[in-house]
Image: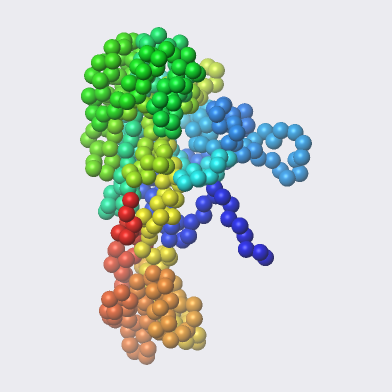
């Protein structure tokens, strides 16, 4: 069989890298559950008419069909995010859910976009949402921001995973729509679509789009750009907006809500996780109606937003009841795969085993298996040497795998001995009661000191 060619955009991790990913996912799940979010998993496949509701994503959906179905529309596709499946899940199960319903979901999604750094065709997302029936109190907007800040803080903690720092950028669609309306703009959606390109295009080009595509006067375009320039880590942005001299009730409402999010999250801000009111954040998707989030990874701003979301008041409805919600989604693969590829974070060993049980000779392998059984009964991950080679070669085998300890079976009346192959210390132990130090029991994720941002 010829050597296979890797598929671009479908990342696969080596065992040590996978351990880092598992620790990240476990940390996220633990934080979400501490805040009372229940875990759900939805199917990978959704009807195409549901997947295509977002419009802009229609070219990215992977269509699903059997190989023998050569005619007709497949009718199904792989989900490209977790929000659309969650909206469908809520509608199907509304009679069995308690509202407001708080859920987290960590799953694979698929998008047929061009692969590049941080963008993949198959990747893992971690979402949290709070959804209500007919109404949903605004304080949940503050809540989801706080939960994600807490989760990101755990990931960035040097004593835990140690990922680089994060900057959560927040805006409010009511604020910017009210501002544009107060300027006399009629097509506010066109303005938001143009302003949303400020991360990709220089300001003068976006200004030209505002005039040419959105129909603004040069003066109106400059006012929109002046609003987009405003950024603050506290509620001082309110006075900066007021100084622009635009008035509208919707603008006032958006200013109040955005200030509440910034002030509500202030206690969670650290030197590694920050929140900022950034008035150029618009989010191009039409269903957002209030708070909107984007997040940048310190030192990796070229990845774009790695965590985004917002308030949606009418994404899910059955025609009689509307289910408004607010949520935020972290692109786990988008953050992690580039960091793993650059060696910024790593696991200190590639296997879960803390101990290698040596084998004296093949005739006594059963004795080594029994010792391994005693260790496992005490919660110690271990494996038995694959061959009864000289002990020096078995130790080197453990070193290559990153296993810190080797257990030598006792001979005659001698007790088994365990060797810390890093220090060379060797002592007699009782395998039924001995355990390695806690820090050696499982692989640890660490920041590679040789790799700088």
**What color scheme is it?**
rainbow
Q: Is residue 406 above or below residue 380?
A: below
Residue 93 showing in the rendered view: no
The residue at the point 39 percent across, 74 percent down is 399
> Furthest residue to the bottom?
412
Q: How many marks?
A: 0
* Figure check: 355 above or below 96: below
Q: Position of residue 264 (x, y in %)?
A: 26, 29
Q: Position of residue 411 (x, y in %)?
A: 37, 88
Give the quarter of the figure containing the N terminus: bottom right
| Relative height, residue 19 to residue 432 (above, below) | above
User: Horizontal and vertical percent for residue 29?
Assistant: 39, 45
Q: Nearer the viewer, residue 202 or 380?
A: 202
Q: Is residue 318 visible?
A: yes
Residue 193 picture location, percent across and down: 46, 24
The residue depicted at 37 percent of the width and 26 percent of the height is 280
Q: What's the residue at 49%, 18% (across, down)? A: 212
Q: Is residue 15 left or right of residue 251?
A: right
Q: Residue at x 49, y 77 (%)?
A: 386
Question: Quick check: 188 left or right of 430?
Answer: right
């Amino acid at each position: 069989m010829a050597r296979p060619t890797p598929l671009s955009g479908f990342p696969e991790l080596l065992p040590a890298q996978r351990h880092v990913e598992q620790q990240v996912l476990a940390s996220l799940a633990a934080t979400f559950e501490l805040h009372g979010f229940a875990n759900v998993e939805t199917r990978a496949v959704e009807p195409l008419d549901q997947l295509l509701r977002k419009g802009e994503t229609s070219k990215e959906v992977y269509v699903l069909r059997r190989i023998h179905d050569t005619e007709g529309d497949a009718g199904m596709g792989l989900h490209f995010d977790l929000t659309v499946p969650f909206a469908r899940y809520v509608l199907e199960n509304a009679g069995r859910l308690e509202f407001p319903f708080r859920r987290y979901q960590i799953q694979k999604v698929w998008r047929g976009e061009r692969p590049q750094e941080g963008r993949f065709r198959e990747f893992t997302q971690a979402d949290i949402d709070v959804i209500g029936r007919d109404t949903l109190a605004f304080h949940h907007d503050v809540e989801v921001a706080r939960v994600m800040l807490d989760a990101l803080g755990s990931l960035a903690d040097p004593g835990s995973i140690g990922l680089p720092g994060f900057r959560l950028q927040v805006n409010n669609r009511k604020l910017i729509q009210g501002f544009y309306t107060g300027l006399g703009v009629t097509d506010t959606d066109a303005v938001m679509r143009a302003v949303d390109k400020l991360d990709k295009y220089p300001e003068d080009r976006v200004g030209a789009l505002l005039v040419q595509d959105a129909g603004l006067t040069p003066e109106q375009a400059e006012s929109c750009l002046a609003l987009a320039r405003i950024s603050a880590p506290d509620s001082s942005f309110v006075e900066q907006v007021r100084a622009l001299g635009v008035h509208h009730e919707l603008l006032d409402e958006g200013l109040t809500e955005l200030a509440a999010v910034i002030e509500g999250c202030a206690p969670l801000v650290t030197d590694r996780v920050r929140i900022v009111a950034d008035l150029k954040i618009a989010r191009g998707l039409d269903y957002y109606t209030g708070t909107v989030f984007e997040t940048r990874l310190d030192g990796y701003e070229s990845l774009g937003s790695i965590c985004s979301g917002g308030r949606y008041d009418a994404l899910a409805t059955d025609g009689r009841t509307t289910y408004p919600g607010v949520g935020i989604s972290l692109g786990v693969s988008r953050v992690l795969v580039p960091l793993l590829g650059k060696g910024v974070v790593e696991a200190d060993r590639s296997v879960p085993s803390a101990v290698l049980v040596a084998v004296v000779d093949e005739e006594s392998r059963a004795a080594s298996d029994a010792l391994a059984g005693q260790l496992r009964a005490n919660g110690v991950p271990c494996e038995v040497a694959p061959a009864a080679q000289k002990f020096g070669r078995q130790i080197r085998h453990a070193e290559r795998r990153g296993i810190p300890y080797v257990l030598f079976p006792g001979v005659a009346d001698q007790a088994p001995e365990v060797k810390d192959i890093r220090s060379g210390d060797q002592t007699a132990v009782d395998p039924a009661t001995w355990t390695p130090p806690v820090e050696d029991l499982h692989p640890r994720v660490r920041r590679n000191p040789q790799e700088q941002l």
